[in-house]
Image (tube, coloured by chain):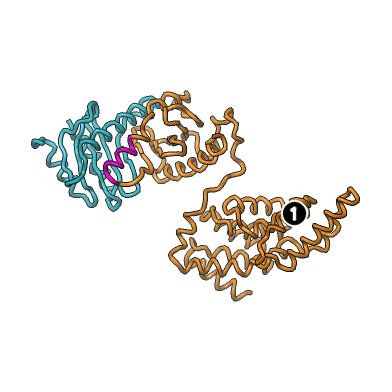
Chain colours: A cyan, B orange
Amino acid sequence: MNRTPYAELLSMLSRHRGVVGSFVVSERDGLAVDSNVQIGVHAEAVAALAASLHRKARLACGAAGCGTVTFLRLDAEKGGICAAGRDDLVLVTISEARANIGLLRVEMMRAAKALT
Amino acid sequence: MADEIRRLSDDLARDPSSLVFMPLADALRRAGQLDIAMRVALRGLDRHPYLADAHDVLARIHADRGDLERAADEWEMALRLDPSHPQANLGLGFVDFRRGNLESAERRLSAAGASDQTGSVSAALAHVRTALGSRSENGTTDTGGATAVPNVTTAVESRVVEVPNAVVARMATPARNRIVTRMTPPSIAEYPAPDRAHARQLFSSVLDAADQSALLVDADGLVLAGTYADRSGLDVAEVVAAELAGVSSEAERAMRHLGLGAWTSLLVEADDAVVAMTPAPLGSLLVVATSRQTPVGLVRLLLDRALTRARDWLARVS
């Protein structure tokens, strides 16, 4: 994957404790625009699924009159996915259970504002 | 007794979340300090609502206060949490006897295991059987023998000494937390009957405020139970459910790709609301929404409460 304007941002997120990957994905088609993931992480598949989840959450929130989705977090037994979007782009991180989600959340929401 | 109460009180003061509230409440009850015993038991149950032994202790306190109705409620709750709980079974047996429900009393008392067949239980059982015999002969119910039967808590007293020891032993091992977490969520008696017409109000008593909604959605995005009102009060449950169709399977697939185990919750923060979801039985999805002012931790708590209710309801209607 070629270097994009998001490389530095993704690198910064991936340095967080417990973060094993981060990427910017297009919500519309689920394609990863850029990624920074550890070896063994199925970035493309996860990017597509994360984009789809974000899209569903956005549409459901729109239907319920909840306003714009600012942050999404999918928790699992051993870790999870966080996503923060802006327009068609979604910033996604994959993290293990030991990650500091509170800190990651703040960083991601701040970073998502710069997505264009 | 006073030394024991002092020691247990000190233990509880050192660790208010410990299970020592059970032996303490029971010791207070035996010392006749029923009001304090009640407060200790209720406070403990606030923290550990799924402990059958704790409900058993509270039941005995109610019984000693002469409130057999509430005692029976607590013993029934203990049996829901642990269907083989011998003391709850015995307690209900005595309550049944006092109420003249002799067949049920006989069944419960005779179901007590050999280790629980104390002299008082055997005596009570003999009274019940005598009363049943005289009823079948005369066609009348003779519960006059009840006066000779030990009172309810005296009859189940044999376990009183054992409960504290067992609890303290549990506390001394790392298994204590496992004991708490493996408890089955309660099947709460005040749940609406499994009538589909009541499905919309299923979560009413779980939610704390008017700005909260809960919705149970099946795998196809159809509403199973609950409501979802937008800010104007319009019910948008069906639209929201339809938009969320497939969320559960996509979350599950994403976690499978990542090897992070089963997904447990999905939290969505939006400008005006926080929406939390969790997988529910039969492939369904439970959705809880609150206003943006609600702390995220509280949203997760609401989700847990609603899930307990959804599980119970689904088990009964499916």
Please tell me whether residue B206 belongs to the stretch shown in magenta. Answer: no
**Residue B282, image x, y percentages:** 46, 36
Q: Is residue A13 left or right of residue B84?
A: left
Where is residue B249? Give x, y as percent.
36, 35
Looking at the rendered structure, the kind of residue marked 1 is: Ala
Split into 4 quadrants, where in the image is the N terminus of chain B?
bottom right
Residue behind mark 1? B105
Q: Position of residue B163 (x, y in %)?
A: 59, 66
Between A61 and A42, the one lying in front of the other is A42
Q: Nearer the viewer, residue B125 or B243?
A: B125
Q: Is residue B38 left or right of residue B312?
A: right
Above or below, B164 against A58 in this view is below
Q: Is the stretch drawn in magenta largely helix, strand or loop? A: helix
Question: In the displayed structure, does residue B280 sit left or right of residue B36?
Answer: left
Q: Badge 1 local density, few (<14 within 10 Å), some, or many (20+)? A: many
| Position of B308 relative to B87 (above/below) | above
Instruction: Identify the chain of the residue marked 1, using the numbered disc in the image.
Output: B
Using the image as rendered, state which of residue B66 and residue B225 is in the foreground: B225
> If the image is split into quadrants, where does the C terminus of chain B sit?
top right
Residue at the spot 15% in from the left edge and 36% down from the top edge: A34
- Looking at the image, which residue is at 72% across and 64% down? B155
Q: Position of residue A68 (x, y in %)?
A: 31, 30
Secondary structure of the residue carrying numbered label 1: helix
The range drawn in magenta is B250-259
